[in-house]
Amino acid sequence: MTSPAENSSSSAPNHEPLARLLGVRKPLDAQARFWVGVLAFAMPLLTWCLISYVPFIWHPQVLVTDAGDSKVPGEHSYVAAGERVDLDVVIMRNRELDAAHARRVSGERVNPIYLQPPHAVARALYTAFTTAPERDGDAWLHESLLQSCKVIFWGFFWSAVFGVPLGILCGTFPFFARLFEPFVDFVRYMPAPVFGALALTVLGLQDEPKIAIIFIGTFFQMVLIVSNTTRSVEVSLLHAAQTLGANKRQLVWNVVVPGALPGLYRDMRILIGWAWTYLVVAELIGEKSGLSAWLYQQQRYRHFDNVYAAIVIIGLVGLLTDQFLALLGRHLFPWETGQTKLVRMMRAVRRALPQRARLAGT
């Protein structure tokens, strides 16, 4: 015989799965992480499909298949077969035709041409790479993509070459923080594109001003982010190293840099995405090039399926780059992640190299 407490507990709703999903600062299990990640992409895709394929949700225009009796005069007599016109225009034109007892306008409810459905964009992801440019001399999509990647790489590379060491100095030594951070904090509020005219005048019309815009857009943010990450190294580690007799150089190279390195790596992953946000503006400076020029051409030819395809490609390149860096980061810092497979492999290779050299010598 069950007690009332047992009956009440059995009849109460079980909220354990929801509690596991919505736990405060509690990590999700592997299965939940997978399905929630799928849902992150499924929700916007489903919304896109609903807007594209369900007529009563939006579809503010009509693709006219029969313009009705074109001989009937009226304010909206310009409606012609094959055109996309607003639904209100079709309604007003049909009122004019009904008053004259003439044949009505008919057509199919559609979205504006700039809102392409998912199947058209999916098809364009293939045809954009295989279809020749409209004009001779224009770049193919893959050529434009490689050009954009080159601009991003060099802009971010030079930003990291100068920004990371300066940020570590500012985060380690208060003297350098006071010397550099006020001016960096001042410049970082200036939009990078405002330097476009100067970059164009000083560096010319080719890739250099574009790389400079990427550099300016990421360098000043990078210095402050890196300095804050460097300051997050535990002071107790510095005190312990000083107790063991470490000098300033040893403190920086053996304590501060290794302690901040995993955080700095994550900062670089975030900042490289920041660099992509400046790409379109940078490539429109001087001679148009890269994906920005390609998008501009497709917009002129009203190939909006290709425009969406290029936007998706930019997102895919960024996502794949970030996921690759995240996977690599799990093995680069074994003292934080516990993943020692890559370290063991490198040690095995290092031990094997001298042995192979000796065998080759004999």
Image (tube, helix red, strand yellow):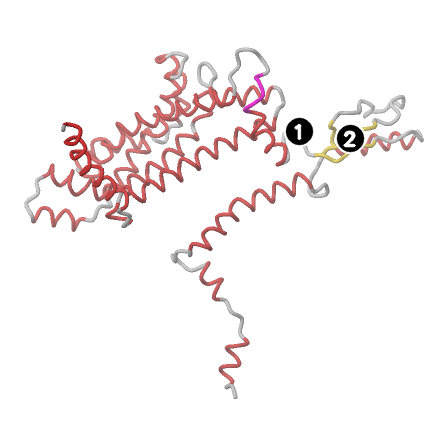
Specify the farthest residue to the bottom. Answer: 1
Q: What residue is at 59 percent from the left and 22 percent from the top?
A: 299
Q: What residue is at 68 percent from the left and 34 percent from the top?
A: 111
Residue of label 2: 89
Q: Position of residue 84 (x, y in %)?
A: 73, 28
Q: Main secondary structure of the magenta part?
A: loop
- The image quadrant of residue 304 is top right
Q: Identity of the amino acid at label 1?
A: Ile
**Residue sitting nearer the eye, 156 or 182:** 156
Q: Can you tell which mark lies on residue 28? A: none
Residue 296 shown left or right of residue 156 in the figure: right
Q: Is residue 71 above or below residue 50?
A: above
* Few, some or many residues within 10 Å of mark 1 (<14, 14–19, 20+): few
Specify the farthest residue to the right. Answer: 101
Residue of label 1: 113
Q: Identity of the amino acid at label 2?
A: Val
Q: Position of residue 92 (x, y in %)?
A: 82, 32
Residue 41 shown left or right of residue 226 in the figure: right
91 falls in the magenta region: no
- Quick one: label 1 or label 2, which is nearer the N terminus? 2
| Circle 1 SS class | loop
- The image quadrant of residue 359 is top left
Query: What's the CA distance linking mark 1 and mark 2?
Result: 17 Å
Specify the farthest residue to the front. Answer: 362
- The image quadrant of residue 11 is bottom right
Q: Nearer the viewer, mark 1 or mark 2?
A: 1
Q: What residue is at 42 percent from the left and 56 percent from the top?
A: 28
* Few, some or many residues within 10 Å of mark 2 (<14, 14–19, 20+): some
| Circle 2 SS class | helix
Q: Position of residue 323 (x, y in %)?
A: 40, 40
- Magenta-tinted stretch: 129-133
**Residue sitting nearer the eye, 323 or 53:** 323
